[in-house]
Image (spheres, helix red, strand yellow):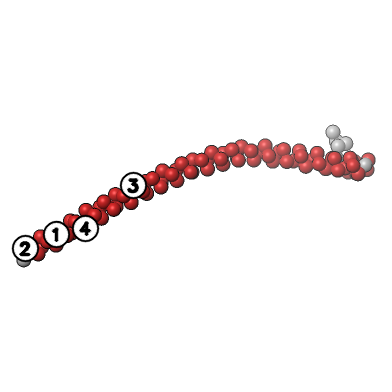
Amino acid sequence: MEDFNLETAKRVSGNVAGLCSWAIAMAYFYGINKEVLPLKANLAVQESRLAQANGNYNDAQAQLAAKMAEVAVCFRFSSHDLQINFIFLF
């Protein structure tokens, strides 16, 4: 296959040179794509895991906000009771 190169193809025919150039480009693309496809598949898996983790995080944030609201209500009542008790002491 040492005769299958661009210089030899240019000497023989312009059409053959174009075909040779295309074949070389496809071989190069295949080599690169062979490495990229597994990376793309892994990216899809990791994006799915990220979406699930973000969903869990948002659920936890909602639970935290609800608990913080409960604590704020309890603290408001508690501080009000402390003020009333403090007034009655004096």
Q: For the point 85% across and 40% down, which residue is it?
A: 19
Name the residue that disc number 3 marks: 63
Question: At which x and y percent is residue 18?
Answer: 86, 43
Identify the amino acid type marked 4: Arg
Dot 1: element: helix
Dot 2: element: helix
Q: Earlier in the sequence, mark 1 or mark 2?
A: 1
Q: For the point 83% across and 43% down, which residue is it?
A: 21
Dot 3: element: helix
Mark 1: few, some, or many residues within 10 Å (few <14, many ≥20)? few
Identify the amino acid type marked 2: Leu
The reply to whether residue 53 is in sight is yes
- Kindly identify which numbered label has been placed on residue 10: none
Name the residue that disc number 1 marks: 82
Q: Quadrant of the N terminus?
A: top right
Number of marks present in the image shown: 4
**Spatial separation of the CA atoms under disc 3 and disc 4:** 20 Å
Identify the amino acid type marked 3: Gln
Mark 2: few, some, or many residues within 10 Å (few <14, many ≥20)? few
Identify the amino acid type marked 1: Leu
Contact flag, marks 4 and 1 (Cβ < 8 Å): no
Q: Earlier in the sequence, mark 4 or mark 1?
A: 4
Name the residue that disc number 2 marks: 89
